[in-house]
Amino acid sequence: MKLSNDFVLSFFGLKEGNHKFEYKIDKQFFESFKFDEFIDADFTVALDFNKKSTLLELHFENKGTGTVACDLTNEPFGLPMEGALDLVVNFGEEFNNDNEEVLILPHGEHQLDLSQYIYEMIVLAVPLKKTHPGIADGSLKSDILNKLEELSPDKHKEIDEIDPRWEDLKKLLIDKNK
């Protein structure tokens, strides 16, 4: 997978101190990772980059909307999402990304591809269950919702009506107490 250089941060020429960067993320970005859960995407990622003499500190924040399909009705809707990620970059003998919060780059490295970190931060913010907001407030009208309502157990069933099998079990319990 090859992304454009838009997400490669070249830190070699930057002075020590804080630097701010902003990235626009769209559906094409996620397609490059073969992530097809978003019908459309519009995210802004703000990077607060602090360059120190021996290490780099990165603080990512994302905010935006991913258009997804509702898990119940399959109706598309805009899902607002936001997230954050902190990363410390140290320098060592060889590349090591075993720790999710600390990245070790080889000495002499002068750039860092941020795309994987941006991707993971946004994708991990996607909730497991995506429900259209119109379902909760009752404003969504859908054939699928009508069918689900039709197939759901009768809400108006008598509460006092008890399955006779439970009555027989209660008799066993009463007999045991005697």
Image (cartoon, rainbow, N blue to C red):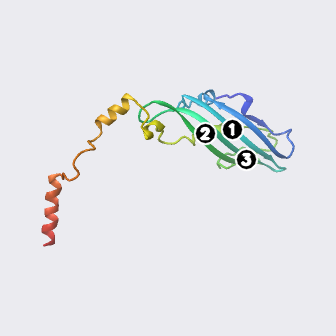
Q: Residue at x 34, y 32 (%)?
A: 146
Q: Among all residues in the image, which is located at the extreme bottom?
A: 178
Q: Quadrant of residue 30?
A: top right
The amino acid on which the numbered mark 3 sits, given as a three-letter code, is Ile
Q: Position of residue 57 (x, y in %)?
A: 75, 48
Q: Does residue 107 appear in the picture of this structure?
A: yes
Q: Left or right: 130 with respect to 55?
A: left
Q: Nearer the viewer, residue 93 or 119?
A: 119
Q: Quadrant of residue 165?
A: bottom left
Q: Residue at x 62, y 26 (%)?
A: 28
| Pointers 1 and 2 in contact (C-beta within 8 Å) | yes
Query: How many numbered tags mark residues here?
Result: 3
Q: Residue at x 60, y 28 (%)?
A: 27
Local SS, label 3? strand
Query: Mark 1 highlights which residue?
Result: 45
Which numbered disc, 1 or 2, marks the residue that appears first in the sequence? 1
Q: Nearer the viewer, residue 90 or 29?
A: 29
Q: Residue 104 bears which disc, if any?
A: 3
Quadrant position of the N terminus in the picture: top right
Query: Mark 2 highlights which residue?
Result: 122
Label 1 to label 2: alpha-carbon separation: 9 Å
Which numbered disc, 2 or 3, marks the residue that appears first in the sequence? 3
